[in-house]
């Protein structure tokens, strides 16, 4: 009886061993295939790349809108993406690049977009207003300042990257 018990036990041991080894070998073969299949998803997004936008000599104290297009890779899908920024030179000769995306519900704002509110960014969707430094005008729909683009200047060209929170708290301070 005990011998039969031991035989079953031995069979079970062999089954477990073969299953384990087989599983291990299968995993070893499948892992590179799975990795290859999902590799684009694991890649860091290209969103942080800086893109050339405009020659610095074109930037004035008056905010101007600049658009740029670049190739965006999203997993297996590549597409042309266009972005925009409102760019100006502040009183300290520092470049300010503001996102045009309204912080209320995401419409696009324009500098001097309303005759009633000159020298401000204006959002036509719900009358959102922002001062030149991006700070939202109190008692208008947006509850936060326009985002700022990360930027750098290389050989006379302005490069812009991702947007970050605009730290301005008052109408007159420079954002950068
Ligand atoms: S989306 Fe700009 S005010 Fe509503």
Image (spheres, helix red, strand yellow):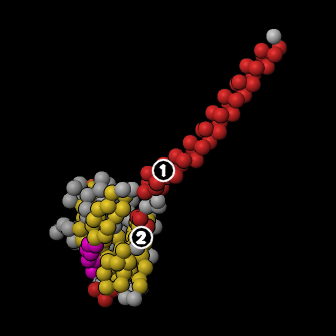
Residue 139 seen: no
- Residue 7: x %, y % from top left: 76, 20
Q: Would residue 29 be found to the left or right of residue 114 on screen?
A: right
Question: Outermost residue, left direction?
Answer: 115
**Secondary structure found at label 1:** helix
Residue span colored magenta: 62-68
- Residue 70: x %, y % from top left: 31, 70
Residue bearing the label numbered 2 = 49
Classify 57 as above or below 67: below
**Secondary structure found at label 2:** loop
Classify 50 as above or below 126: below
Identify the mark nearer the N-term, 1 or 2: 1
Residue drawn at the location 38% of the way across and 78% of the way down: 159
In reply to whether residue 164 is colored magenta, the answer given is no
Q: Quadrant of residue 67?
A: bottom left
Look at the image and tell me in which quarter the C terminus lies: bottom left
- Residue 4: x %, y % from top left: 77, 15
- Ligand 1 falls in quadrant: bottom left
Prevailing SS of the magenta stretch = strand
Mark 1 and mark 2: Cα distance apart in space: 29 Å
Q: Quadrant of residue 89?
A: bottom left
- Residue 112: x %, y % from top left: 22, 71
Residue bearing the label numbered 1 = 33
Front residue of 103 and 49: 49
Residue drawn at the location 65% of the way across and 39% of the way down: 21
């Amino acid at each position: 009886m005990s011998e039969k018990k031991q035989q079953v036990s031995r069979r079970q041991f062999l089954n477990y061993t073969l299953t384990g080894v087989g599983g291990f070998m299968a995993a070893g073969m499948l892992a590179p295939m799975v990795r290859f299949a999902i590799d684009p998803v694991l890649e860091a997004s290209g969103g942080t790349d800086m893109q050339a936008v405009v020659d610095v000599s074109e930037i004035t104290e008056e905010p101007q809108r600049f658009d740029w297009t670049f190739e965006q890779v999203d997993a297996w899908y590549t597409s042309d993406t266009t972005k925009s920024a409102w760019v100006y030179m502040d009183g300290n000769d520092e470049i300010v690049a503001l996102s045009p995306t309204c912080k209320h519900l995401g419409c696009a704002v324009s500098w001097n977009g309303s005759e009633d509110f000159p020298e401000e960014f204006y959002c036509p969707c719900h009358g959102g207003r922002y001062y030149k430094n991006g700070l939202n005008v109190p008692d208008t729909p947006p509850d936060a300042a326009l985002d700022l683009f990360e930027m750098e200047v290389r050989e006379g060209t302005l490069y812009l990257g991702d947007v970050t929170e605009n730290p301005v708290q008052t109408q007159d301070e420079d954002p950068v």
